[in-house]
Amino acid sequence: MLEMIKESDLKVLITEEELQNKIKELGKVLNEFYKDEELYVICVLKGSVMFTTDLVKHLKMPLNMNFIRLSSYGSGFTSTGKVNAVDISLPNLNGKNVLIVEDIIDTGLTAKFLIDFMHLNFKTKSLKFCSLLDKKSTRKTDIEPDYYCFQIENQFVVGYGLDYDGFYRNLPYIGYLETNE
Ligand code: 5GP
């Protein structure tokens, strides 16, 4: 049984305004990069749902939205270190521009799993990986995101899609639990 975190125990790490401003900026960069080319966006559920839906509102090219579901975190704060494909049903992405949208890169194992999966199954025209957050210091692979919005320290964050035992995904900001360590 996990101990419940109270919202009042959370400290704000990234405000709603900071998130929205950065996402708008990233939208501009992507519009510039893809111009009017068709783009297949892959939202990695459940964590990147908020980020993806806000980001795509800024994108102007013909856009095809797709959703896949993976899991690597068990419950609580710690990663299982193993990525499980829960639901990967995708259209044929051969010859397409593909942008994978993740909530956070931590060890990079999920990103590696996804990139390997894409290379194994499709010959895409281009494949880019974009993450809202980048926890650079905990990386266990050589994967780097092509685009990210914020780099953060090694701390467990919740909000804006990121959960603790299924809760707090609805918060419009990114928060963390202050510990006494
Ligand atoms: P990785 O495979 O890079 O270690 O982890 C990726 C996944 O772990 C993310 O998509 C996310 O679901 C989860 N994760 C990693 N760090 C955090 C964190 O600080 N908070 C939450 N809520 N999930 C995290």
Image: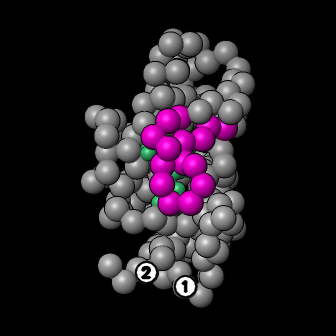
Up the image or down, 162 lies above or below 93; here it is: below
| Label 1 Cα crowd, 10 Å radius (few <14 / some 14-19 / many 20+) | few
- Label 2: how many Cα within 10 Å (few below 14, some 14–19, many 20+): few
Left/right placement of residue 59 relative to residue 144 reads right
Q: Residue at x 62, y 37 (%)?
A: 70
Residue at horizontal 53 percent and vertical 81 percent from the top: 10
Amino acid type indicated by mark 1: Asp
Up/down of 151 relative to 46, above or below:
below
* Relative image position of residue 62 (x, y in whole percent): 66, 34
Tell me the residue that label 2 is attached to.
178
Q: Residue furthest front?
A: 1
Can residue 169 be seen in the rendering of this structure? no
Left-right relation of 109 to 40:
left
Image vertical order of residue 176 relative to residue 35, above or below: below
Taking depth in this image into account, of 19 and 30 the one nearest to the observer is 19
Residue 94 position within the rendered picture, expressed as x and y whole percent measured from the top left:
58, 13
Residue under the point 69% across and 60% down:
166
Majority secondary structure in the magenta region: strand
Nearer to the camera, 7 or 102:
7
Instruction: Name the residue tied to disc 1.
Output: 9
Q: Answer yes or no: do the residues labelled 2 and 1 have beta carbons within 8 Å?
A: yes
Q: Is residue 159 above or below residue 179?
A: above
The kind of secondary structure element at disc 2 is: loop
- The residue under label 2 is which amino acid type? Glu
The C terminus - image quarter? bottom left
Numbered range of the magenta stretch = 69-83
Residue 69 visible somewhere in the drawing? yes
Q: Position of residue 24 (x, y in %)?
A: 52, 60
What residue lies at 51% left-to-right and 74% top-to-bottom? 175
Dot 2 or dot 1, earlier in sequence: 1
Which quadrant, please, contains the N terminus?
bottom right
